[in-house]
């Protein structure tokens, strides 16, 4: 919502909004754009000022049943759920839609950074806080391209089950992977694949699709059609693939081959083989748009990552603290593998806050195995979604016992206070501390640094 609000303001609209009284990772971007949300949700927010032309809402805070949305509808004001509104504003542009269960935020931000660096001035909407290398997560550009995440979650929980990304009609579609990430929205992995196929079939114009060749579940998109299909990944059979990947502390370097032609080396300021694959997808998309290798190489090197994607929060002595949004086992595994590649000889302490009872229950066997690259793991209580009304028999202690079958140094730490107490007595010089999850754990890193500073 932050990215779309900034886009609309830059386009010349007067933008107002409402939110709960809590700071989120997007606050910095909103403050920079001069957008200050009203606190709480009240009918008076619509009645006390000039009547808006359009009210856009998310599935959070009761979605369509929110009092402000209800009031708008009673007043005859047009309302739109966020996914539909994003598609509405993308209409008429050259749409570059980045879909996938994991990696779409980073890949979208990479493409937007490369296009911006090359002077294309694209519009973009990325679901995160600040992007290092860009002014913010949203922008109204004068160029023809509009780059946006394409989210497979449902449009309006309880009212409209349409996958959010079906409001987009991509000219270029990037699919990073297909996974079973939303058990509250899809009955099976097959249902998720069917949603991605529906997006594939409503492409327009160029009809160029980039597919992760390393992801078996994405092969459903490789069937014969009138689309141009470009594969990318670590496989040497992929059209776009890297080689000679090497890691230095704070930098990743790789060579690239496009359809059997070597095109030189590229540098990334983000960690992990998974981000090398994201970069291959971004490069493939930008090649399809006609950008030069010089512009692509330069633009990719300026990408410094996004907020909450292995974000360096700070250091105290030789101890480094990072934060990451990873909340699915595959994301956790990839992030920890990237951390291990950058810091092969350091001890890694992971604090993972599980997100939603439904995901924790559905993916418990996978969660039990995904922390292999972490030396110590702390698990506080599950952060429940506002959409959930039952715990489904799940508690963090159940997750701890499951992980314990594969890793001994695993601890239940209940909440932030107990986690800080644990770190006070267990942290050593040279440690890498990583907070991880989709709940409110993004604030903990700052408090960890404060405590470590006091201890020193």
Image (cartoon, rainbow, N blue to C red):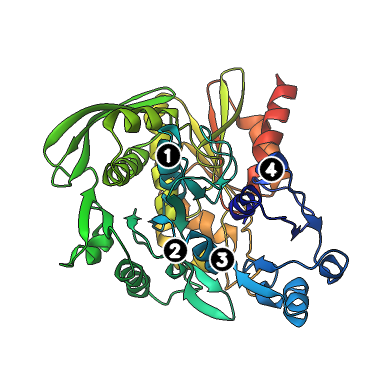
Q: Give me the C-alpha separation between circle 4 and circle 3.
A: 20 Å
Is 145 located above or below residue 301 in the figure? below
Q: Disc 1 on helix, strand or loop?
A: loop
> Which class describes the residues within 10 Å of circle 2: few (<14), some (14-19), or many (20+)?
many
Marks 3/2 in contact by CB < 8 Å: the verdict is no
Is 360 located above or below residue 276 in the figure? below
> Which class describes the residues within 10 Å of circle 4: few (<14), some (14-19), or many (20+)?
some
Q: Position of residue 91 (x, y in %)?
A: 46, 63
Is 157 located above or below residue 416 in the figure? below
Q: Give me the C-alpha separation between circle 3 and circle 2.
A: 23 Å
Q: Residue, x 43% and y 49% (percent of image)? A: 144
Residue 120 numbered mark, or none: 1
Residue 181 numbered mark, or none: 2
Q: Which residue is mark 4?
A: 33
Q: Position of residue 96 (x, y in %)?
A: 39, 53
Question: Which is in the foreground here, disc 1 or disc 4?
Answer: 1
Query: Furthest residue to the left?
Result: 260
**Quarter of the image that includes the N terminus:** bottom right
**Is tag 1's residue or tag 4's residue first in the polypeptide sequence?**
4
Of residues 376 and 147, the one nearer the viewer is 147
**Is tag 3's residue or tag 1's residue first in the polypeptide sequence?**
3
Of residues 49 and 440, the one nearer the viewer is 49
Of residues 192 and 413, the one nearer the viewer is 192
Q: Residue, x 75% and y 23% (percent of image)? A: 454
Q: Which residue is mark 3?
A: 85
Q: Disc 2 on helix, strand or loop?
A: loop
Q: Disc 4 on helix, strand or loop?
A: helix
> Which class describes the residues within 10 Å of circle 3: few (<14), some (14-19), or many (20+)?
many
Q: Give me the C-alpha separation between circle 1 and circle 2.
A: 34 Å
């Amino acid at each position: 919502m932050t990215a779309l609000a900034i886009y609309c303001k830059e386009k010349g609209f007067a933008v107002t909004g409402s939110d709960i009284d809590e700071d989120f990772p997007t606050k910095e971007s909103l403050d920079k754009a001069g957008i200050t949300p009203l606190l709480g949700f009240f009918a008076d927010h619509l009645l006390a000022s000039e009547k808006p032309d359009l009210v856009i809402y998310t599935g959070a805070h009761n979605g369509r049943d929110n009092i402000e949305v209800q009031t708008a509808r009673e007043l005859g004001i047009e309302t739109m759920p966020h996914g539909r509104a994003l598609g509405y504003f993308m209409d008429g542009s050259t749409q570059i839609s980045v879909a996938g269960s994991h990696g779409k935020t980073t890949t979208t931000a990479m493409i937007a950074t490369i296009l911006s660096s090359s002077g294309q001035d694209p519009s973009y909407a990325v679901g995160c806080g600040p992007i290092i290398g860009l002014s913010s997560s949203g922008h109204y550009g004068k160029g023809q391209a509009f780059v946006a995440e394409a989210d497979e979650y449902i449009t309006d929980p309880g009212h409209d089950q349409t996958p959010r990304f079906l409001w987009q009609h991509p000219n270029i579609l990037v699919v990073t992977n297909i996974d079973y990430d939303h058990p509250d929205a899809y009955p099976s992995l097959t249902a998720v694949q069917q949603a991605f196929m529906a997006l594939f079939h409503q492409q327009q114009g160029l009809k160029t699709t980039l597919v992760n060749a390393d992801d078996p579940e994405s092969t459903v998109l490789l069937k014969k059609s009138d689309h141009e299909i470009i594969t990318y990944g670590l496989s040497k059979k992929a059209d776009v693939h890297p080689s000679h990947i090497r890691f230095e502390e704070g930098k990743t370097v790789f060579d690239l081959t496009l359809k059997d032609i070597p095109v030189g080396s590229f540098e990334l300021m983000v960690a992990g083989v998974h981000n090398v694959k994201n970069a291959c997808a971004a490069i493939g998309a930008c090649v399809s748009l006609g950008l030069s290798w010089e512009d692509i190489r330069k633009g990719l090197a300026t990408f410094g990552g996004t907020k909450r994607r292995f974000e360096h929060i700070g250091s105290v002595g030789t101890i480094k603290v990072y934060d990451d949004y990873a909340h699915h086992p595959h994301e956790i595994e990839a992030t920890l593998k990237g951390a291990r590649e950058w810091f092969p000889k350091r001890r890694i302490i992971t604090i993972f806050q599980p997100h939603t009872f439904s995901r924790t229950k559905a993916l418990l066997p996978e969660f039990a195995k995904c922390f292999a690259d972490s030396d110590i793991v702390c698990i506080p209580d599950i952060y429940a979604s506002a959409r959930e009304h039952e715990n489904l028999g799940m508690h963090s202690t159940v997750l701890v016992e499951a992980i314990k079958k594969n890793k001994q140094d695993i601890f239940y730490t209940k909440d932030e206070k107990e986690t800080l107490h644990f770190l006070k007595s267990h942290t050593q010089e040279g440690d890498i501390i990583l907070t991880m999850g989709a709940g409110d754990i993004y604030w903990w890193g700052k408090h960890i640094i404060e405590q470590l500073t006091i201890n020193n």
